[in-house]
Image: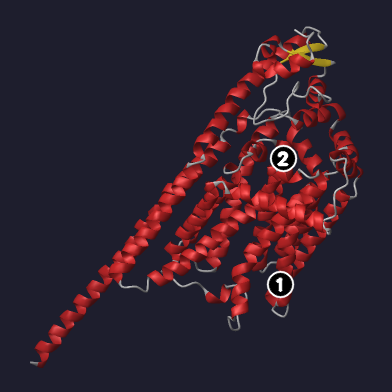
């Protein structure tokens, strides 16, 4: 009797174990099936990135590029840097970057968009992956991959000035490149902080000084953003200075700030910077410390965010983050690696961790808008290309908030009864996948149209360039030229009431005395204003 009961208990145990194995197998398989929902938004984001990257060969000179390419050819590399630093805008690192871009004709400008897309995407992936792996996040590579392609696609293609922030070297070197350099330096910090090798840390500190100087002398916008984030990180690190692990980050951040301040001093006190500021606006700006100046800056800052938030595609960052958080919610995070680890999690500490990222975005974005107002006059805030400096950290922050919300929500849904938890999780994941895919897909048509316009323009630009070269080979010093504007760029013959600086720069670029409109262009409606101003020209 006893042996029969024992055998039956053994069979029941085996059955239970087998059931547990099947159940665990299903639980292992089902998340992978759910994780496939990340593919639709990822595919749309990758499509956008590929579309932009492979449009690089269609980049041609436009607006300020005419002047940069012409003066590099005319003055030489050192002469160009000297001229622009002392007489144009004082951005030393920017001038060096322009020299590198146009040193070999247009090859550098054509490669730059591809390089920007690749370096930003890989940089965000690496940074997020290292952080998630340290947190023991579930599937860190998949999560980092989705966030990287979504954030990069939104950065380049969700705004109103896609051409300027990706394809126009005059803007990309100043406003897009600094943020990418900042991301890669954060990666260097993360790697060096975990390395036991002394030479790795010394190299990281030296690079921090050099890259800080470069970013400080590239432009004001990202100097403000980087200063806000680096200053906050230094303050938080100093709060834990007794921990030996914080000593290297404190050193690295302090050196980074020193490099940035040195670079910004070279920019701010340059003769070119003073000339640019004096030439930008004629009326004295009210001080930011005055009621009028502060209210004006706040109003423009609110208008900036109204413009940004009116673009539905940006919300895809939050939704993609939500999906990542939901998929990772079945496993607990590594608690000791959370911010402010150790001690009790009091309400003020929780509020600080929750609110600090948003506060930093607010401060950084307001600093950029206030700086644009000071440097470019009352309408400086409308230069949307400069918004990229705070948009990249803002989009990353939105994605991380979405991931935190998804993780919190998923942990609570997993505590429900199984017959309720599974449909709820499926609905949340399916809805997030659909919503993020639709939001990203909404910007595909206009970016496809832009790439098509670039391709058509490149063909027309090359044909016009051949025509100009042919006239020069015939010995003509006054040649006919057909302007090919794109995305509202300033091209020759656009201005009729002020000096045609674009036309003058294009003439210097070709080495001729003057450019005059081609008969083909004069027969188009685009030349109406110019023909009215110059009635004798046919």
User: SS for tag 1?
Assistant: helix
Whichever of labels 2 and 1 marks the residue nearer the N terminus, that label is 2
What's the residue at 85%, 34% (across, down)? 80
Query: Farthest residue toward the left?
Result: 1
Per the rendering, the mark at residue 516 is: none
For residue 261, say whether it is visible. Answer: yes
Q: Nearer the viewer, residue 538 or 33?
A: 538
The crowding category of the residue bearing disc 1, from other C-alpha atoms within 10 Å (few below 14, some 14 to 19, many at least 20), is: many
Quadrant of residue 101 within the rendered picture: top right
Identify the residue position indicated by label 1 in the image. 237
Rendered-image quadrant of the N terminus: bottom left
Among the 4 quarters of the image, the one containing residue 27: bottom left
Q: In this rendering, would 150 be left or right of 213?
A: left
- Relative depth, front residue between 23 and 41: 41
Q: Residue at x 61, y 28 (%)?
A: 58
| Residue 276 quadrant | top right
Tag shown at residue 171: 2
The quarter in which the C terminus is drawn is top right
Instruction: Give the percent coordinates (x, y) of residue 267.
Output: 85, 48
């Amino acid at each position: 009797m006893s042996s029969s009961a024992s055998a039956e208990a053994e069979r029941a145990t085996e059955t239970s174990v087998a059931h547990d194995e099947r159940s665990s197998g299903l639980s292992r398989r089902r998340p992978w099936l759910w994780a496939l929902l990340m593919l639709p938004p990822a595919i749309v984001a990758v499509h956008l990135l590929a579309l932009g990257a492979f449009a690089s060969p269609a980049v041609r000179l436009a607006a300020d590029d005419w002047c940069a390419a012409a003066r590099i050819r005319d003055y030489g590399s050192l002469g160009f840097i000297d001229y622009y630093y002392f007489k144009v805008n004082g951005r030393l690192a920017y001038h060096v970057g322009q020299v590198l871009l146009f040193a070999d004709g247009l090859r550098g400008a054509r490669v730059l968009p591809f390089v920007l897309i690749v370096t930003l995407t890989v940089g965000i992936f690496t940074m997020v992956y290292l952080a998630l792996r340290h947190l023991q996040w579930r599937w860190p590579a998949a999560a980092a991959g989705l966030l990287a392609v979504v954030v990069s696609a939104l950065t380049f293609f969700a705004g109103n000035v896609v051409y300027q922030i990706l394809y126009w070297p005059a803007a990309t070197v100043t406003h897009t490149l600094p943020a990418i350099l900042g991301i890669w330096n954060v990666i260097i910090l993360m790697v060096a902080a975990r390395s036991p090798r002394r030479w790795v840390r010394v190299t990281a500190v030296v690079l921090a000084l050099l890259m800080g100087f470069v970013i400080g002398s590239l432009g004001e916008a990202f100097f403000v953003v980087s200063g806000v984030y680096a200053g906050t990180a230094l303050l938080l690190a100093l709060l834990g200075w007794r921990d030996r692990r914080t000593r290297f980050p404190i050193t690295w951040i302090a050196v980074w700030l020193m490099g940035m301040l040195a670079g910004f001093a070279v920019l701010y006190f340059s003769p070119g910077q003073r000339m640019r500021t004096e030439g930008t606006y004629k009326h004295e700006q009210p001080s930011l410390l005055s009621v009028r100046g502060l209210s004006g800056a706040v109003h423009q800052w609110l208008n900036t965010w109204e413009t940004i938030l009116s673009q539905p595609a940006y919300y895809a960052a939050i939704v993609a983050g939500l999906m990542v958080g939901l998929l990772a919610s079945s496993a607990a995070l590594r608690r000791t690696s959370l911010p402010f680890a150790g001690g009790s999690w009091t309400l003020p500490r929780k509020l600080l961790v929750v609110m600090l990222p948003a506060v930093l975005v607010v401060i950084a974005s307001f600093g950029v808008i206030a700086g644009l107002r000071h440097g470019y006059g009352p309408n400086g805030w409308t230069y949307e290309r400069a918004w990229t400096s705070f948009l990249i950290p803002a989009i990353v922050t939105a994605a991380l908030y979405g991931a935190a919300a998804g993780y919190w929500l998923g942990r609570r849904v997993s505590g429900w009864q199984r017959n309720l938890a599974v449909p709820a999780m499926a609905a949340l994941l399916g809805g997030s996948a659909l919503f993020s895919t639709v939001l990203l897909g909404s910007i595909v048509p206009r970016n496809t149209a832009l790439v098509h316009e670039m391709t058509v323009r490149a063909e027309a630009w090359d044909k016009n360039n051949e025509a100009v070269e042919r006239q020069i080979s015939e010995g003509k010093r006054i040649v006919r030229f057909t302007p090919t504007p794109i995305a509202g760029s300033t091209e020759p013959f656009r201005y009729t009431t002020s000096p045609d600086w674009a036309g003058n720069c294009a003439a210097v670029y070709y080495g001729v005395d003057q450019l005059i409109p081609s008969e083909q262009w004069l027969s188009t409606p685009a030349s109406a204003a110019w023909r009215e101003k110059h009635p004798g020209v046919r």
